[in-house]
Amino acid sequence: MGNLSRTVTILGSTGSIGVSTLSLFEESRVEVEILALTAGRNVEKLAEQALKWRPRLAVIEDETLLPVLRERLAGSGIETAAGTGAVRAAAELPAEWVMSAIVGAAGLAPTLAAARRGAIVALANKESLVCGGPGVLDVARKAGGTIIPVDSEHSAIFQVLQDPCRDKVARLILTASGGPFRTWTYEAMRAATPEQAVAHPNWSMGAKISVDSATMMNKGLEMVEASYLFATPENQIDIVVHPQSIIHSMVEYTDGSTLAQLGPPDMRSPIACAWAWPDRLSWPAAPLDLAAIGQLTFEAPDLVRFPAIAIAREALRIGGHAPAAMNAANEVAVGAFLDRRIGFLDIAGSVQDTLDRLNGGGELGDQPGGDELEAAMIIDASARRVATEVVSRLAAARAA
Ligand code: NAD
Ligand code: MG
């Protein structure tokens, strides 16, 4: 049953997770009928994937690239479309299984669109959950669909946290690789370049999540993600640095027993879990060779060099829209860092500053009306506005 055939849509097919998903389909030889593939700007890769996988529809978010997409797919019979609305419309096509692998809050509207029609949503796009809040899960539940986490930590917890003992959880323990700067001094981190920040020791990922791993804001976002997915308060979620990335996370139960999920660091494994759950997919996965790995080590995260973890805890404690605001501020700051406008340590600094300003102005407690998407988009936009100001000031000071 695990290698069952299905209709599928991949949102963000040209990114690291999108490519891993298609690679898994190929390796496992599952039969898929792809309804839509979508991408942001990588039109050449999208066209190449479309010609190989023959979806009904290929969508490029950047409208200026539609003529190129049309030209590349001319005569193929594959429909083409462009723009934010078209990405969302792709999610509305009746695919049974949708991979949500767009990066950032831009993934929220299409993720909700898929959830709202009751699809199985394989959720890699953690920012959409952090931005949209637990309401995103309710939308799926009400529609009779499911959201299955693909983030490796959450997939691990999902696999070891099954009924009937969900209420006997003492702690969720998220493992973190520590990123490329785990052993760097604070002074060295101050001068870190985008190239150094995206060079992750264990995982090959998109630029944004790679920078998030370097600041450990990735773990902060994941703490929020875990809190929402598993209805667990912040004080029951711990983080431990585990540089080998073999244990993907753990659940400690009230009887003192801790269950862990292990595997080589390959995202195709959590994607396979999201594909086949509650069954298992058969594919030529690399075996876990613990003797060759030799040692699994653990250390506490350093909150001085990685303040993002404390910021995320604070956002969860504030509750409401604070995590959504944190996410938006982080997206702005990471963009500015990748554009070399601000320094590496300015990323967490500007997120904290943005949250302080919004919290001081009482904006985080506001519960805007409307549906999940509208409410999330309001706080996302106001946090982006404040963060852009904060970042511009830092950039100007740096240029002077
Ligand atoms: P990526 O940057 O490699 O790919 C992102 C995809 O989204 C691409 O197809 C891109 O074209 C598309 N895209 C970008 N902006 C868009 C927009 N505004 N509208 C529509 N499409 C857009 O990122 P990734 O590493 O594959 O990560 C995707 C998501 O999965 C992120 O939320 C990330 O946090 C999460 N995730 C990734 C990994 C990993 O190993 N890469 C692990 C866990 C979670
Ligand atoms: Mg992760």
Image (cartoon, rainbow, N blue to C red):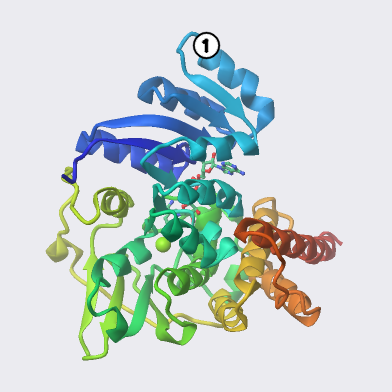
- Please identify the quadrant where the C terminus is shown: bottom right
Residue 99: percent from the left, percent from the top?
41, 45
Mark 1: C-beta under 8 Å from nearest atom of ligand 1: no
Please state which of residues 120 and 332 is positioned toward the viewer in this rendering: 120
Q: In this view, does 375 lie above or below 166?
A: above
Residue at image coords 42%, 60%: 141
Crowd class of label 1 (few under 14; some 14 to 19; many from 20; radius 10 Å): few
Q: What residue type is labelled 1?
A: Ala
* Residue under label 1: 74
Say which residue appears at 18% left-offset and 53% top-offset.
279
On the image, the x and y values in percent for residue 29 come to 21, 33
Q: Residue furthest top?
A: 75
Taking the image as shown, residue 115 lies to the left or right of residue 242, namely right
Query: So how many labels did they put on this image?
Result: 1
The answer to whether 228 is drawn above or below residue 25 in the figure is: below
Residue 145 visible to an observer of this rendering: yes
Taking depth in this image into account, of 154 and 144 the one nearest to the observer is 144
Q: Is residue 323 left or right of residue 48?
A: right
x%, y% of residue 340?
70, 54
